[in-house]
């Protein structure tokens, strides 16, 4: 593993801090931020013929409520085991620490990438590596 990722959090440290798949909704204090996010960031890209990669699905809030019924196949990539119901169109891939390479996802199989509240836990170098691998190998 390249040492540029030394500052990124390890799988077991993540689990100690956040547990196994916390579920958080995004209802704001003064307005429904969750619906605003859906309307602006997801709805324009819904396509039941497309496959989506969700990075860091955790408790599956976005996966089960907004992705599973609006896409053909959802690849969920996370460092924790799934804690939510996996539907027939969800392929859950539990990865090891610092795996920014889309392990387990076939080349040219992704039409849309979704991540919410996950990439903020990665270093800039890790985000860059993820984006390079997504673009180069999977879109």
Image: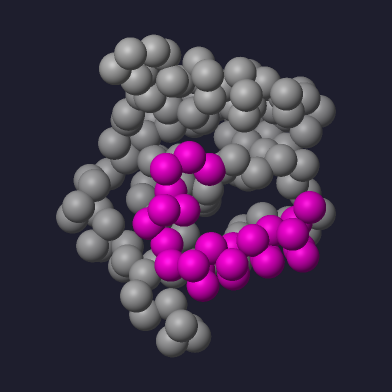
Give the percent coordinates (x, y) of residue 29.
Answer: 29, 17
Can residue 94 be spotted in the picture? Answer: no
Residue at figure coordinates x 43%, y 32% from the top left:
60
Q: 38 left or right of 118?
A: right
Task: Give the answer, above or below, for where 101 lies relative to 118.
Answer: below
Q: 80 left or right of 134?
A: left
Can residue 46 be spotted in the picture? Answer: yes
Residue situated furthest left in the rendering: 16
Q: Of helix, strand and loop, which mostly describes the magenta segment? A: helix
Task: Inspect the magenta stretch and tell me whether residue 131 lies in it.
Answer: yes
Q: 27 left or right of 69?
A: left
Residue at figure coordinates x 32%, y 66% from the top left:
9
Task: Inspect the magenta stretch and tell me whether residue 76 lies in it.
Answer: no
Image coloring type: one colour
Q: Which residues are magenta?
A: 115-139
Q: Nearer the viewer, residue 90 or 56?
A: 56
Give the percent coordinates (x, y) of residue 27.
Answer: 36, 18
Task: Give the answer, above or below, for where 72 lies relative to 35.
Answer: below
Q: State how many labels appear.
A: 0
Give the percent coordinates (x, y) of residue 48.
Answer: 76, 23
Residue at figure coordinates x 42%, y 14% from the top left:
32
Residue situated furthest top in the rendering: 31
Q: Nearer the viewer, residue 4 or 61?
A: 4
Q: Quadrant of residue 31?
A: top left
Residue at figure coordinates x 49%, y 67% from the top left:
124
Q: 79 left or right of 108?
A: left
Give the percent coordinates (x, y) of residue 5.
Answer: 43, 77
């Amino acid at each position: 593993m390249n040492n540029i990722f030394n500052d990124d959090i390890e799988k077991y440290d993540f689990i100690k801090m956040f547990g196994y798949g916390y579920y958080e909704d995004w209802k704001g204090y003064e307005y429904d931020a969750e619906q605003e996010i859906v309307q602006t960031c997801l709805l324009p890209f819904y396509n039941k013929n497309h496959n989506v990669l969700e990075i860091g699905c955790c408790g599956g809030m976005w996966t089960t409520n907004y992705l599973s019924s609006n896409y053909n196949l959802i690849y969920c990539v996370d460092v924790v085991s799934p804690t939510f119901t996996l539907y027939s169109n969800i392929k859950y891939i539990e990865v090891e620490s610092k795996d920014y390479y889309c392990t387990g996802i076939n080349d040219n199989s992704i039409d849309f990438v979704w991540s919410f509240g996950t990439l903020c836990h990665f270093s800039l170098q890790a985000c860059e590596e993820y984006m390079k691998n997504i673009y180069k190998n999977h879109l």
